[in-house]
Image: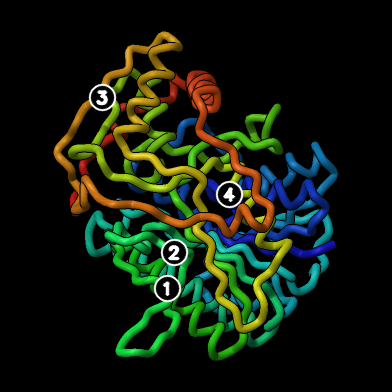
Amino acid sequence: MSHILILGGDGYLGWPTAMYFSSRGYQVTVVDNYFRRNACTELDVGMLYPVPTLQERAKIWYQKTGCEIKVVIGDLTDPELMRSLFDGRVEYSWAVDNRFVGIPETVVHYAEQPSAPYSQIDYKYANITIQNNLLVTNNLMFAIKDYSPDTHIVKIGTMGEYGTPNIDIEEGWLEVEHKGRKDTFLFPRQASSLYHTTKIMDTDLLWYGVRMWDLRVTDLMQGPVYGMETHESKGDPRLMTIFNYDEIFGTIVNRFITQAVAGYPLTVYGRGGQTRGYLNINDTLQCVHMSEQTPANPKQLRIFNQIIQTFSVNELAEKTKKVGNNLGYNVKIDYLPNPRKEAEEHYYNPTYQGLLDIGVTPHYLTDEVMKGMFELVEKYKHNIRTDVIFKGIQW
């Protein structure tokens, strides 16, 4: 069995990824320091429903499936913890079999502070974002260089690295002709938050590791993800992923649906023309799996734009309103002064063919999919705190 190491395995994407690979016969180890849970507590922003600890989740999964997910609790900014995952010194917080399962063939790197608003609260939160995101990536690169140079890194980047350029966004690379000569460079990056800036720096770090140490890396430039249920979690709410609906950690589709259920007007910033690429949480799992199945070559930084559809904020708001009203909700849209420094009307035409070419089958944001999300959120309506939905973090 292939060994998959998932960094950030307690998170919105990390835990579903762990179950996804485990259910397919992989040996899975997850590492997390509960950053997101602790940040939600510190900032007093609510999750829609309680989530068992990572160790408890792994036990529940084992009881239901007989498949083991080994758990390590610790801070990956500590280089020795990172290195222990590759040199055999690792200590599991929970495991059926405490033996070291060996060097992973693939590392899935989710272990980052994932929120643009969080990084903009003030200089302290900016520092936390920069320190966490860059140190974890750097520690990972050195551990693989020193112990496991053939391990394939699958890192979750973000479409936000590109910004909103007035040209088509290619998949990571751009051929440039200048004064009669040609070369290929990383597509120009222009982040709109400190979080997105750290993701650009991640890409640059990994590109260094590829050039200097012959690492093999797939960098997935992911758009905002929506959804809360995957095939593996169906039938047992204890296995559902963390779900945020606040402005700091909640993604826009998840926020809008929760706002509609709570009777809170949908929060559209400015004119609402901001356009981004989106994907279903089940497609994130597919994209990571297909990337693992067809790994990058040594000396290759392979970049895919990980999106399935593009929408403007206005289009998402109108879609939420339509589906919500058909379900009996009285959904209203509120256009707020934009707390963010961003273009509210812009050109946006990204290429996103690479993942389809390696076998990803898209799930689209249909009315039926949105209806299913409404019905799930409705089950936890009593937990929704309207006071955490919008606080207007400025940048």
The residue carrying mark 3 is: 333
Q: Can residue 125 be seen in this view?
A: no
Q: Residue at x 51, y 77 (%)?
A: 206
Mark 4 or mark 3, earlier in chain? 4
Residue 39 lies, with reference to residue 136, above or below; the image says above
Mark 4 or mark 2, earlier in chain? 2
Mark 2 or mark 3, earlier in chain? 2
Q: Which residue is drawn at 58% across and 59% down?
A: 354
Give the camera-side residue of 57 and 165. Answer: 165
Residue 368 lies, with reference to residue 168, above or below; the image says above
Give the camera-side residue of 47 and 103. Answer: 103
Q: Distance between the residues labelled 4 and 3?
A: 29 Å
On-image quarter of the N terminus = bottom right
Mark 2: secondary structure: loop
Are dots 4 and 3 in contact, CB under 8 Å? no
Q: Distance between the residues labelled 2 and 1?
A: 7 Å
Q: Which residue lies furthest to the top in this view?
A: 328
Is the residue marked by circle 2 packed among few (<14), some (14-19), or many (20+) residues within 10 Å? many
The kind of residue on which mark 3 rests is: Ile
| Mark identifier at residue 284 | 4
The kind of residue on which mark 4 rests is: Thr
Q: Position of residue 2 (x, y in %)?
A: 80, 64
The residue carrying mark 1 is: 174
Are dots 2 and 1 in contact, CB under 8 Å? yes
Q: Residue at x 54, y 23 (%)?
A: 368
The residue carrying mark 2 is: 170
Query: Mark 4 or mark 2: which is in front?
Result: 2
Give the camera-side residue of 3 and 91. Answer: 3
The kind of residue on which mark 1 rests is: Leu
